[in-house]
Image (cartoon, grey):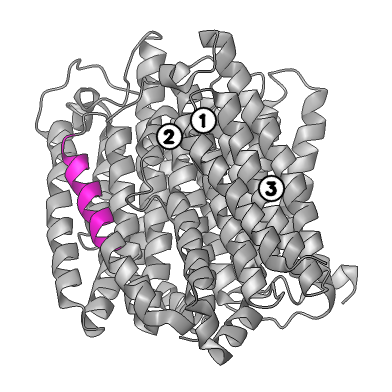
Amino acid sequence: MSIVDFISQFAPEVILTIAALAVMIIGLGLGTKEKRALGYLAAISLIVATLIIVFRGTYHLQLEGIMADSLTIDPMSQFFKLTFLLVSLIVVIASLKQYDNHSNQDEYYTLILLGTIGMMVVASAIDIVTMFIGFELASLSTYALAGFNKKDPSSMEAAIKYFIVGALSSTLLLFGLSYLYGLSGGLTNIGEIADYFSMNPGIIQSPMGIMAMVLIVAGFGFKMALVPFHMWAPDTYQGSPTVISALLAAGSKKMAFVAAFRVLLIAMIAIKVDIAMVFIILAILTMTLGNVVALSQKSLKRMLAYSSVAQAGYISMVFVVMSPEAMTGAVLYVMSHAFMKTGAFIAVAALGYMLLRENISAKDVDHLDNFAGLGKRSPFLAFSIMIFLFALAGIPPTAGFVSKFILFYSVLKGGFVFLVIIAILNSALSLYYYARVVKYMYVLPPSSSEKLALPGAYSLAILLALIGVLAIGIVPEPFVNWAASAANVLGL
Amino acid sequence: MLPVSYYLIVSAIVFCIGIYGVMTLRSGIMIMMCVELMLNAANINLIAFASHFNQVNGHVFVLFSIALAAAEAAIGFAILMSIFRSKENVNIDNINILRW
């Protein structure tokens, strides 16, 4: 395979890499005002990359040559790349307003682009080395982004908590992968490791194999924020700049899911029974704790963070069932949740921006009281928040309903009735705290009758997320088909 | 040549020291050093396996992971520097605005 073929096959990644470096280098010579153009450059590169992915669709390409063992282009990777690109695009568009007077905005866009590239590499990786490098590229960029508001102590606290836990989880993952490498006799390709283990099932059931599995599950569990590895998530999502919380919840968390889909489902297929029990416990704990703690949250960002923990619990039911239908549901859920969560966080960021513009010393702009009477003060914002929250709760005709339906139904078909009952009870519980926000917005009187003017960049970002949520909810067929062909790749 | 199990025992001990340090130490810098210790334990494993199986891909993995560890340390110290500027220390017990 020549270098030209490689560039054309990985055109989205190449475009983003060039754009990231260009933003960084051009930014060196510009003043704060001129740097605004760099945000548009980043957005354009993301749009181009997204269009390439969309037009290529669900094709499956057999790569040749040096990269054939480490990267793949299949419906699964394309689906996740599309998710990551759209999330980054929405985040970048929202940031155009948020950071238009920041003197380091060039670094901000570079980090977002590099993080997106890392996530896309993980989506394509079929080799543990490539996967780990992509994982770290995305993690390192997001550590820096979480602490981007250097003057804000809570942003720094979010960054250091995210960094320590993230670095710890990377080492756990690497240690687990090193055992996996040794057990498989020196293989790094995930498919080859799976073949080796299915021919020698005894190896992975040895103490070392179980240790490797525990470490890998813990490593991914930290990134996916499964209970009991979730403690960093609420703090980080609450403290980070709100647009970055969107990227963390919708981007870097989903990256852990695609990596776990490939590694856990393929390489661990030999020990199906043991892993199911582990994930039944993790899934039940995660969804229950996430929803119960979210009930008492007054900060909307923290509430969304706990709801994100709970949603990770729903998605991780796929590791229990491991059927093609469950996989379809989980893959679709990842994309739906990405849109819903990005939209919700961006909407909270927009309100925070408007409140801070009114009163520069405002504290706790994401507090629930600030949402009182929002339906009168900013009808579009209130309406979109309502749609996002109802989608998170799983009410039709939104993306949340379709994906929840497919996932829960497949778990039921897999014979885990008690798991579905717990998941549905949890969904009902979650409606309480989502509906409470809607009550604040539409029933309670506003604190001031003044209208809030939503900046255009935020409106566009929220509109994009809204279109995503409603498109999956109203016309689910193309998305379900794509998710189904993505699930087929794993060969369950 | 020593059997591979000796290296694995060393790396397991190093890994446990690292994880103990992360859980008990209170200084941000010491925690980062313990994380590096854990990464190096994984690197010892990879190198031991790679030379045991006479394969080069483990060595390559280690080179990448060392580079990543350096990048990680750079970002970690940058975050700790910002915290030090505002709080005059890097004791993680003092980092407690966000809770529940």
Return the residue nearer the eye: B50 or A143: B50
Across and down, in percent, residue A119 comes to 60, 55
- The residue located at (66%, 74%) in the rendering is A73
Q: Secondary structure at mark 1?
A: helix
Instruction: Nearest to the eye among marks 3 and 1: give it.
Output: 3
Q: Is residue A100 visible?
A: no
Marks 2/1 in contact by CB < 8 Å: the verdict is yes
* Residue bearing mark 3: B40
- The residue located at (26%, 25%) in the rendering is A367
Dot label at residue A159: 1
Magenta stretch, residue numbers: A283-296
Across and down, in percent, residue B33 comes to 63, 33
| Separation (CA) of disc 2 from disc 1 | 7 Å
Picture quadrant where residue A468 is located: bottom left
Chain ID, mark 1 = A
Across and down, in percent, residue A329 comes to 35, 73
Marks 3/1 in contact by CB < 8 Å: the verdict is no
Describe residue B67's horizontal placement relative to residue A4 as left or right: left
Dot label at residue A236: 2
Describe residue A417's horizontal placement relative to residue A259 as left or right: left
Marks 3/2 in contact by CB < 8 Å: the verdict is no
Quadrant of the drawing holding the C terminus of chain A: bottom left
Quadrant of the drawing holding the N terminus of chain A: bottom right
Q: Is residue A482 above or below residue A154?
A: below
Determine if marks 3 and 1 fall on one subunit: no
| Separation (CA) of disc 3 from disc 1 | 24 Å
Describe residue A130's horizontal placement relative to residue A204 as left or right: right
Q: Secondary structure at mark 3?
A: helix
Q: Earlier in the sequence, mark 2 or mark 1?
A: 1
Return the residue nearer the eye: A180 or A151: A180
